[in-house]
Amino acid sequence: LYISVFPELNKNPVEGFSAGLIDDDDIYKWEVVIIGPQDTLFEGGFFKAYLTFPYDYPLRPPKMKFITEIWHPNVAKNGDVCISILHEPGEDKFGYEKPEERWLPIHTVETIMISVISMLADPNSDSPANVDAAKEWREDPNGEFKRKVARCVRKSQEMAFD
């Protein structure tokens, strides 16, 4: 895992995030920091998350959980990230996602981070992990939703250097 991922990241660095091992002795647990994408409500934020890889990676997707508080339709209140690329491979029993939108072994940390950065910029409120955030995003994105995101961005900036 470590051997296959790090050279790839060094060859093709993605703007907007950094990644590394939480503990040098455990290649399955990573810490990532996503910088809020420019021209979005999340701009200027530093959002820490853990990426936990299963032992049978890349056959199954890692799990991603924000440690920094974040208000977003596709992030559960406990921080769990809910996007298609991180869902188990195969058919979606609810019929929302096509198999090719779900996890495929060709995905890398880079493609996951690109998807998460894209998710921040463009939430999917059709199948939300945080129903309250999705409702605010749909009904008044520049009202309560924007205020809660701004609070999370400020908090993330304060915590970034702890």
Image (cartoon, rainbow, N blue to C red):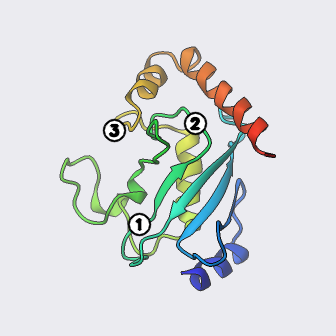
Question: Mark 2 against mark 3, which lies toward the viewer?
Answer: 2
The amino acid type of the residue labelled 2 equals Ile
Estimate how packed mark 1 is, as few (under 14), some (14 to 19) or many (20 or more) residues with alpha carbons within 10 Å. many
Residue 127: mark: 3
Query: Of the residues tagged 3 and 1, which is closer to the observer?
Result: 1
Of the residues under marks 3 and 1, which one precedes in the sequence? 1
Q: In this view, does 112 lie above or below 79?
A: below
Q: What element carries label 1?
A: loop
Q: In which quarter of the image is residue 101?
A: bottom left
**The residue under label 3 is which amino acid type?**
Ser
How many other residues sit within 10 Å of disc 2, few (<14), some (14-19) or many (≥20)? Answer: many
Q: Which residue is drawn at 71% across and 67% down?
A: 13
Q: Distance between the residues labelled 2 and 1?
A: 22 Å
SS type, badge 2: loop
Q: Residues within 10 Å of mark 3 (few under 14, many from 20)?
A: some
Q: What numbered label is drawn on residue 70? A: 2
Residue furthest left in the image: 93
Which is more N-terminal, label 1 or label 2?
1
Q: In this view, does 124 lie above or below 31?
A: above
Q: What residue type is labelled 1?
A: Pro
> What is the distance, in whole Å, between disc 3 and disc 1 at their CAs?
19 Å
Task: Identify the residue under disc 1.
Answer: 61
Q: How many marks?
A: 3
Residue ID at (45%, 47%): 80
| Marks 2 and 3 in Cβ contact (< 8 Å) | no
Choose the circle earlier in sequence order: 2 or 3: 2
How much space separates mark 2 and mark 3, taking CA atoms?
17 Å
Q: Which residue is drawn at 79% across and 46% down?
A: 162
Q: Which residue is drawn at 48% across and 24% down?
A: 137
Q: Could you say where residue 15 lies in the image, as x and y percent from the top left? A: 72, 57
Displayed quadrant of residue 109: bottom right
